[in-house]
């Protein structure tokens, strides 16, 4: 079973994604606060830790790029997916490549498609 760290500041969306993922056979640790999510990642950054990080792009306090940057300092290999309701033109492609961002999912999210992308990701199998 895949172990996912999910970070989304909108509580209703966070719970919706978490419940759908769990019904699809994934384990999800969900956080609305990116700082708390980062602390959780630091505690569980080992071979038995997370298989995937999914983070919203724009959040108060720390955005998804900042979170990805800090996670990359601890773990260069974990796949990271960003979610955004904004135009991806706002996201610098150089930074995405440098941080090795796996994918960008645009909101509104089609959860079935999201699950399919995760389960088809070769790095996660």
Image: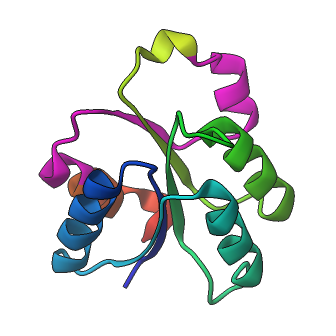
Give the extent of the magenta segment.
91-114
Quarter holding residue 76: bottom right
Towards the viewer: 99 or 34: 34
Is residue 105 shown left or right of residue 8?
left
Queried whether the magenta region covers residue 86, the answer comes back as no
From the viewer's perspective, is residue 69 above or below residue 35?
Answer: above
Residue 49 location (% of width, % of height): 62, 83
Residue at image position (37%, 48%) is 10
Q: Is residue 18 left or right of residue 6?
A: left
Q: Reply above or below: 90 against 80.
A: above
Name the spot of residue 31 as percent of width and height, x first.
49, 65
Q: Quadrant of the C terminus?
A: bottom left
Q: Is residue 100 magenta?
A: yes
Direction from residue 2 to residue 78 in the image, left or right? right
Q: Which residue is found at the position 46% from the left and 67% from the top?
A: 124
Q: How many marks?
A: 0
Q: Position of residue 79 (x, y in %)?
A: 57, 56
Q: Is residue 102 above or below residue 28?
A: above
């Amino acid at each position: 079973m895949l172990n996912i760290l999910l970070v989304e500041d909108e509580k209703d969306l966070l719970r919706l994604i978490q419940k759908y993922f769990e019904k699809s056979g994934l384990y999800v640790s969900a956080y609305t606060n990116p700082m708390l999510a980062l602390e959780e990642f630091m505690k569980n950054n080992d071979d038995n830790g997370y298989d995937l990080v999914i983070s919203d792009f724009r959040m108060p306090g720390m955005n998804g790029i900042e979170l990805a940057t800090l996670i990359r300092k601890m773990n260069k290999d974990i796949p990271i997916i960003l979610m955004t309701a904004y135009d991806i033109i706002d996201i610098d492609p150089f930074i995405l490549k440098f941080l090795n961002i796996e994918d960008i999912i645009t909101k509104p999210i089609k959860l079935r498609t999201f699950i399919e992308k995760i389960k088809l990701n070769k790095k996660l199998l």
